[in-house]
């Protein structure tokens, strides 16, 4: 991992992720930063969490995710035909099914959930 400042000057870097995480394969499909933490999703393993300097913190064992969003201590994600929240400080997962067939994408923004399928967009508050 390499960290850059606003002028694109390298200010920090870590070693090889495979060596740092002591694993043979790291196959990420999604990466995001929130509140000074970097969340690296590997669907077969879970979400690796790093601090702002690239130091490994923990693995959140949510497997099979394509994408997710983080707000404070809660990770929001799509699971089957529903949306879920996982509080990674309290280890609490809550899922709510939605009567929408074949969800293709879910986005959480300002206390609203935007869900789409092949031909429609749904907004829930």
Image (tube, helix red, strand yellow):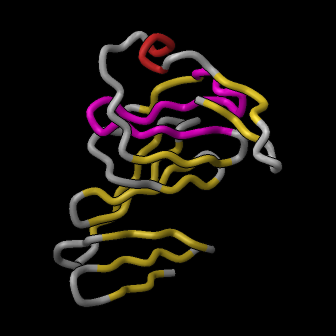
Tell me: residue 59, above or below residue 116.
above
Residue 24 image position (x, y, % from top left): 31, 14
Magenta stretch contains residue 20: no
Query: Which of the image's four quarters has the N terminus?
Result: top right
* SS majority, magenta: strand
Where residue 111 sits: x, y (%)? 59, 73
Numbered-mark total: 0
Q: Quadrant of residue 96?
A: bottom left
Looking at the image, residue 8 lies above or below residue 45: below
Specify whether 4 is left or right of 85: right
Residue at 25 percent across and 72 percent down: it is 103
Q: Is residue 52 located in the magenta-colored stretch of the structure?
A: yes
Expressed as whole percent of the image width and height from the top left, the position of residue 59 reads 46, 27
Q: Is residue 50 left or right of residue 80?
A: right
What's the magenta region? 37-56
Q: In this picture, is 77 found above or below 105?
A: above
Q: Residue at x 33, y 60 (%)?
A: 78
Q: Observer-nearest residue: 18 or 94? A: 18
Q: Nearer the viewer, residue 40 or 98?
A: 40
Residue 45's quadrant in the figure?
A: top left
Q: Position of residue 115 (x, y in %)?
A: 37, 77
The answer to whether residue 25 is above or below residue 43 is above
Residue 63 placement: quadrant: top left
Residue for point 40% across, 56% down = 77
């Amino acid at each position: 991992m390499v960290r850059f400042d606003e002028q694109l000057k390298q200010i920090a870097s870590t070693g090889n992720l495979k060596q740092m995480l002591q694993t043979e394969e790291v196959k990420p499909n999604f990466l995001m930063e929130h509140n000074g933490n970097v969340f690296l999703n590997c669907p077969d393993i879970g979400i690796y969490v790093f601090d702002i300097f690239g130091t490994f913190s923990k693995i959140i064992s949510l497997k099979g995710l394509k994408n997710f969003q983080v707000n404070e201590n809660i990770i929001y994600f799509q699971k089957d035909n529903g949306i879920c929240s996982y509080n990674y400080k309290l280890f609490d997962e809550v899922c709510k099914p939605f009567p929408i067939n074949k969800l293709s994408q879910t986005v959480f923004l300002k206390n609203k959930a935007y869900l789409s399928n092949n031909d429609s967009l749904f907004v829930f508050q």
